[in-house]
Image (tube, coloured by chain):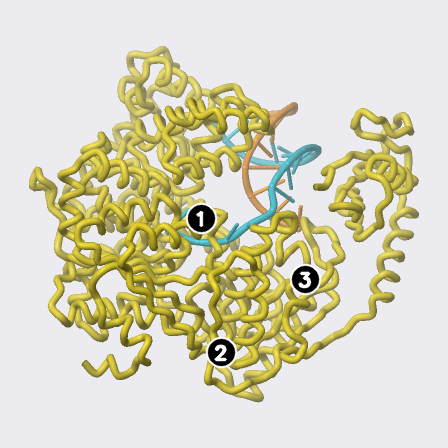
Chain colours: A yellow, B cyan, C orange
DNA sequence: GTGGGATCGGTTTTT
DNA sequence: CCGATCCCAC
């Protein structure tokens, strides 16, 4: 067992004691992934059946990496592990079991966009105002209650939830939730939460199914346990109940998904639910320099909510952490690109040794531009994923509809794309008919000859139905790749893109080709995997069917290509960087209101989560760490002044060095210049109007540029004294805004010299 | 039913 | 600044 010799004592203990409930608490850089992979490999080497091992991760990236590493040690057996993200593993199980609760095994998976679109539709159908019932917020709420295992019925009877909704002036939320669930069910569709929820439901309702999986999975292992939510834990707890061979690996200090329901309670409950558990602590850090480890420790100790832990390292002190101030976001980008160039020359780092980490995806732009100008190859993770692009979703929608006629979202997307004369009003009528007769949209389409519709439209619809049915018939004879190409041709989808010679058009065309390629790969991949078989004897999950492909693809977030091996600088959010490490790390945008984000400044819990996030960010670095911030930053195309992040002050002085000091006075000078320039700037299109601020909150209309002065008076009147902390410049449509800093942030806006209070602060 | 121009509103983070 | 949406002319 040569691989065991690569481990230190604590790691080895955690690898070889494979039985019984186990918790491995592993600090950043402590070889957590290695321990987990070796533990699984060890199980296999000791003769465990790979099909009896369930290993759950959070990202596809993590599970791919782990499978590869296990394969190196334990051979091709690793391919048969039941391993993947929670969502993909449960989707696989549901493919076998979903029929028990009335879903087809070919159920569609709705991604976030599909589900939001459905919610939007429902809100409109119910005649509700989408300014009050904001689809995003409703979606968030539905997701939250699903993960708390609250059914629509329970929601409607829960006085606390009802009161909350009433206070938010959204009393119909419970009803929306109910309708949303019904519509998903009717469409044969599950959203991301449903994959968990329905798995849980089936295990609870059907003891024989529970029995089956309890005995199938003799070993259960969970990575990043601190990020599991209540529902996920409830499921694995059930499954592991018989053999009790459950291993969780995690670090409460790296819990950064509370916003989506992850809870520390799972760690505490775990100790309660499995009282005789063994705990292994991995605290030695092999990744970072002493300076970085020290900064991380001091920082995280400021959090009250934490299990006491201290990471340490035998590595050298290393370079000091460099804090960098730049005048603007663009110069921040330029500085980082310069720095990368210099380090590559002087110290021979590879491109792939660098990572630029930011808080929000929107920040990537400046770095992209600078890197491109410096001819440094880079790769951006996250942002708009490949599978969210319009052209991809369009083709996928055809495929989805072919597999599942009832998929409402897919249907709505492509019934008139490319245009075939079935417009919005026709579709509206059909949907109303379907709702009234309690049918599905597809049923109405199929029976369109019974309804009163203009002949032209009728023909168009009949032709459409016929086309989709013919695709479905062909799907039985063709493989997924041939079918997809056939569909692309028949629908003119591909030729439409091919004829578009704009830059975007060409890239869309290429994207579709890439999708076809990936389907081809999927079809030709002859990796053997033991199939799942239903009680009815149906063979599932080893086929190359379109249905399997579609379910897999929806759960894929980004490009799972082997980009890790390419020699490129990596750009990503801090969230996406979890589990990764780089010799040189730039954590950028270290500004108050950005990192920590402004929503987190008013709650202790949220601020602590931001701090854990920052902890994750800096512990990605092996040798060099740069923390940069800009004095000014564009937001919605408008200039803002920024303060350095409080987190910068939480790093001990003796491990940092500064670069690019800018005098405070100078900043104020610039602020004032802007201010005076603004008040002199003539604002066009000023409507004639009364000139006194109204107390009712009605927009106050000023007649000219003096509106700015008037605006400040309104501010004082409404909010009391405050100082101007930033000004957003006069943009394309003459917007000016003042940020006030009294208790919180107050903001007003001058628009066509019309004054409006946009947000009242906290 | 379609396409163009004006207007409004919005930024966490992921499966 | 950028995309979604609304409104209007064909």
Residue A288 shows which numbered tag?
2
Q: Position of residue A272 (x, y in %)?
A: 33, 51
Q: Which residue is mark 3?
A: A646
Q: Residue at x 85, y 26 (%)?
A: A694
Q: Residue at x 30, y 38 (%)?
A: A108
- The chain letter for the residue carrying disc 2 is A
Q: Is residue A41 left or right of residue A64?
A: left
Q: Is residue A427 left or right of residue A633?
A: left
Label 3–label 2 contact, CB within 8 A: no
Q: Is residue A252 left or right of residue A198?
A: right
Label 2 environment density (alpha carbons within 10 Å; few <14, some 14–19, many ≥20): many
Whole-number angstrom distance, CA of label 3 to CA of label 1:
37 Å
- Check chain identity for marks 3 and 2: say if they share one: yes
Q: Residue at x 38, y 62 (%)?
A: A250
Q: Is residue A683 visible?
A: no
Disc with the residue nearer the chain's start (3 vs 1): 1
């Amino acid at each position: 067992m040569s691989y065991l010799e690569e481990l230190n004592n604590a790691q080895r203990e955690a690898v070889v004691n494979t039985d019984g409930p186990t918790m491995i608490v592993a600090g950043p850089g402590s070889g957590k992934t290695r321990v987990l992979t070796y533990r699984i490999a060890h199980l296999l080497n000791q003769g465990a059946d790979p099909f009896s091992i369930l290993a759950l991760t959070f990202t596809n990236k993590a599970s791919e990496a782990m499978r590869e590493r296990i394969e190196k040690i334990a051979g091709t057996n690793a391919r048969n592990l039941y391993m993947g993200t929670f969502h993909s593993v449960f989707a696989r199980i549901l493919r076998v079991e979903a029929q028990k609760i009335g879903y087809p095994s070919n159920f569609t998976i709705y991604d976030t966009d599909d589900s939001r679109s459905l919610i939007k539709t429902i809100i409109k159908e119910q005649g509700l105002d989408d300014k009050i019932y904001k689809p995003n917020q409703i979606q968030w709420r539905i997701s939250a209650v699903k993960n708390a295992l609250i059914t629509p019925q329970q929601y409607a009877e829960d006085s606390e939830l009802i009161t909350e909704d009433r206070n938010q002036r959204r009393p119909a939320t419970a009803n929306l939730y109910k309708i949303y669930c019904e519509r998903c069910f009717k469409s044969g569709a599950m959203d991301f939460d449903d994959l968990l929820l329905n798995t849980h439901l089936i295990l609870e309702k059907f003891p024989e199914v529970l029995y089956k999986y309890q005995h199938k999975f003799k070993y259960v292992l969970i990575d990043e346990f601190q990020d599991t939510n209540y529902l996920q834990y409830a499921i694995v707890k059930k499954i592991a109940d018989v053999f009790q061979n459950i291993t969780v690996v995690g670090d409460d200090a790296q819990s950064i998904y509370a916003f989506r329901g992850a809870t520390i309670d799972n760690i505490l409950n775990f100790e309660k639910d499995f009282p005789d558990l063994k705990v292994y602590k991995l605290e030695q850090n092999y990744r970072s320099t002493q300076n970085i480890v020290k900064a991380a420790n001091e920082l995280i100790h400021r959090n009250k909510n934490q299990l006491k832990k201290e990471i340490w390292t035998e590595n050298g002190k290393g370079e000091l952490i460099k804090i960098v101030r730049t005048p603007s976001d663009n110069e921040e980008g330029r500085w980082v690109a310069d720095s990368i160039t210099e380090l590559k020359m002087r110290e021979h780092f590879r491109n792939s040794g660098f990572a630029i980490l930011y808080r929000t995806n929107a920040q990537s732009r400046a770095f992209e531009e600078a890197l491109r100008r410096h001819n440094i190859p880079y790769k951006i993770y996250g942002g708009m994923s490949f599978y969210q692009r319009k052209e991809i979703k369009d083709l996928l929608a055809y495929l989805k509809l072919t597999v599942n006629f009832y998929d409402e979202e897919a249907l709505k997307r492509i019934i008139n794309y490319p245009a075939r004369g079935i417009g919005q009003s026709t579709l509206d009528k059909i949907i109303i008919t379907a709702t009234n007769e309690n049918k599905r949209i597809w049923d109405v389409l199929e029976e369109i000859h019974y309804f009163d519709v203009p002949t032209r439209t009728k023909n168009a619809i009949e032709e459409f139905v016929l086309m989709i049915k013919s695709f479905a018939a062909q799907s039985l004879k063709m493989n997924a790749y041939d079918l997809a190409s056939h569909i692309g041709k028949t629908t003119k989808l591909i030729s439409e893109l091919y004829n578009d010679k704009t830059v975007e058009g060409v890239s869309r065309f290429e994207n579709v080709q890439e999708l076809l390629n990936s389907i081809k790969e999927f079809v030709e991949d002859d990796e053997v995997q033991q199939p799942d078989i239903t009680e009815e004897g149906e063979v599932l999950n080893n086929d190359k069917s379109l249905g399997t492909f579609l379910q897999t693809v929806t759960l894929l977030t980004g490009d799972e290509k082997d980009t890790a091996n390419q020699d490129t600088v990596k750009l990503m959010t801090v969230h996406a960087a979890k589990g990764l490490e780089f010799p040189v790390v730039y954590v950028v945008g270290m500004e108050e209101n950005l990192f920590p984000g402004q929503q987190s400044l008013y709650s202790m819990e949220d601020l602590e989560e931001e701090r854990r996030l920052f902890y994750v960010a800096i512990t990605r670095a092996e040798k060099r760490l740069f923390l940069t911030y800009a004095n000014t930053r564009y937001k919605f195309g408008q200039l803002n002044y920024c303060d350095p992040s409080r987190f910068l002050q939480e790093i001990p002085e003796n491990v940092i060095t500064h670069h690019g000091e800018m005098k405070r006075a100078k900043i104020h000078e610039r602020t004032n210049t802007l201010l005076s320039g603004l008040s002199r700037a003539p604002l066009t299109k000023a409507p004639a109007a009364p000139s006194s601020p109204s107390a009712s909150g009605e927009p106050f209309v000023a007649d000219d540029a003096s509106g700015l002065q008037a605006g400040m008076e309104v501010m004082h009147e409404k909010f009391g004294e405050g100082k101007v902390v930033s000004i957003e410049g006069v943009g394309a449509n003459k917007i000016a805004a003042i940020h006030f800093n009294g208790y919180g942030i107050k903001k007003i806006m001058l628009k066509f010299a019309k004054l409006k209070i946009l947000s009242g602060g906290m």
